[in-house]
Image (cartoon, grey):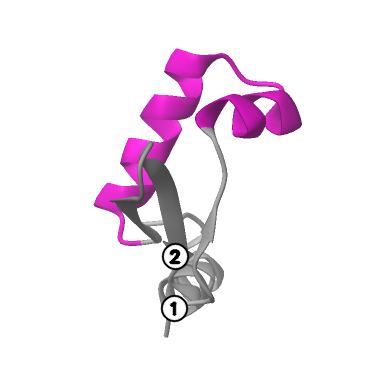
């Protein structure tokens, strides 16, 4: 189940997370590959909208409790 969709700029995320842009892009791509988030571009000018997959996060937390590390 996905949480409600929201948008935020990469710049805003970088400021809030104290990350560089390249570091943030790498982290975002990893979250997408793991199925933790989905992104969509919408509007003019295009904005990145995010959806968070809560079930996937809970599965990863459960796997940590069972294996001592995330899969």
**Residue 50 on the magenta span:** no
Where residue 38 appears, as percent x and y from the top left, is 34, 59
Please state the horizontal and vertical placement of residue 36, each as a whole percent of the image: 40, 61
- Residue 28: which numbered mark, if any? none
Crowding at label 1, few (<14), some or many (≥20) Cα neighbours within 10 Å? some
Q: Is residue 62 above or below residue 11?
A: below
Q: Residue at x 52, y 76 (%)?
A: 3
- Part of the protein shown in magenta: 10-35
State the image quarter where residue 22 is shown: top left
Q: Which residue appears at 74% of the width and 32% of the height?
A: 16
Q: Earlier in the sequence, mark 1 or mark 2?
A: 1
Asked whether the beta carbons under mark 1 and mark 2 sit within 8 Å of each other, the answer is yes
Quick check: 52 above or below 30? below
Q: Main secondary structure of the magenta part?
A: helix
Q: Residue at x 40, y 27 (%)?
A: 25
Left or right of residue 71: residue 49: right
Q: Residue furthest left?
A: 33
Residue 28, picture quadrant = top left
Can you say which quadrant of the picture contains the C terminus?
bottom left
Q: Which residue is mark 2?
A: 51
x and y, in percent, of residue 43 in the image: 36, 50
Q: Nearer the viewer, residue 54 or 62?
A: 54
> In the rendering, which numbered label is found on residue 2?
1
């Amino acid at each position: 189940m996905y949480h409600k969709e929201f948008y935020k700029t990469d710049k805003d995320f970088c400021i809030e997370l104290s990350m560089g842009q390249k570091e943030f892009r790498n982290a975002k791509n990893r979250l997408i590959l793991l199925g933790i988030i989905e992104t969509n571009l919408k509007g003019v000018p295009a904005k990145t909208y995010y959806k968070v997959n809560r079930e996937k996060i809970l599965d990863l937390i459960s796997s940590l409790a069972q294996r001592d590390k995330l899969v």
